[in-house]
Image: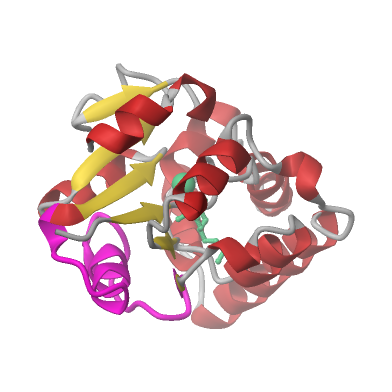
Amino acid sequence: DNKAFIFDLDGVIVDTAKYHFLAWKKIANQLGIEFTEENNELLKGVSRIRSLDIILELGNKAASQEDKDKWLTQKNEDYLSQLVDMDHREILPGVFDVLQFLKSNKQPIALGSASKNARPILEKTGILSYFDAIVDGNDVTNAKPDPEVFLIAAKLLNVKSENAIVFEDSVAGIQAANIANMISIGIGDKNILHEAKYVFDNFTAISEHFLKGL
Ligand code: B16
Ligand code: MG
């Protein structure tokens, strides 16, 4: 049976978490809410709207929809301004080699990200052409751990769920892959991503032999 490889974006292909953090920290501090890197873990893989709600919950603050919309726009403009100079150097270690290996073995590749900024990031880093399908925050209504994003990707690539392999750095994303009955591969800390079928520190730890055996 045909397989498909689905990649999350932030924290898997590029380390944009640091830029999201700086932009959210500005908003939080503006509202008098303390926001640490540890708090930022809660936002990984989570949609922009839900991220703001989590920050407001941390600070025990209520806000009008109008204010929320204003902060969401401000956060995104700030985040995008930090991506202006982004290029291929931002691609995380080993990712390019794995994409190249899969491509040369004619394996279908998809993106499955919560971000609404996924396309420009793939373009800037020069890897857009590796993807046979892109499913991002503009295409889904239900955020991870809902499996919608990965199910749409598998459908676009015409593969059954059990033949789809998902690379994820967030707990919500691993749960989404598991709920979809896909093969979940965590990229990051084993203790945090213990629900994943396999976990690797990063892509340099993933061998061609392992990929072939999936
Ligand atoms: P945006 P992923 C997620 O991307 C990030 O992990 C998360 O921190 C972010 O809030 C979310 O995208 C939305 O991003 O504001 O650019 O639409 O990990 O699913 O690729
Ligand atoms: Mg991620």
Which residue occupies the foreground of this view, 185 or 15? Answer: 185
The stretch of residues the image draws in magenta is: 134-162
Is residue 173 inside the magenta stretch? no
Judge from the rendering whether residue 134 lies leftward or rightward of residue 161; answer left or right: right
Q: Residue furthest front?
A: 105
Judge from the rendering whether residue 209 lies leftward or rightward of residue 10; answer left or right: left
Q: Residue furthest right?
A: 85
Q: Check the image and tell me how it is coloured.
A: secondary structure
Residue at left 24%, top 56%?
A: 3
Residue at left 46%, top 20%?
A: 205
Which residue occupies the foreground of this view, 101 or 8? Answer: 101
Q: State which quarter of the image contains the N terminus.
A: bottom left
Residue at left 58%, top 31%?
A: 94
**Residue 186, located in which quarter of the rendered image?**
top left
Judge from the rendering whether residue 15 lies leftward or rightward of residue 204; answer left or right: right
The spot of residue 165 in percent (x, y) is: 27, 48
Residue 36 in view in this figure: yes
The spot of residue 40 in percent (x, y) is: 53, 38
**Residue 192, located in which quarter of the rendered image?**
top left
The spot of residue 102 in percent (x, y) is: 45, 48
**Residue 112, located in which quarter of the rendered image?**
bottom left
Is residue 159 inside the magenta stretch? yes
The spot of residue 156 in percent (x, y) is: 31, 78
Residue 180 in view in this figure: no
Which residue occupies the foreground of this view, 46 or 130? Answer: 130
Q: State which quarter of the image contains the C terminus.
A: top left
So how many labels did they put on this image?
Answer: 0
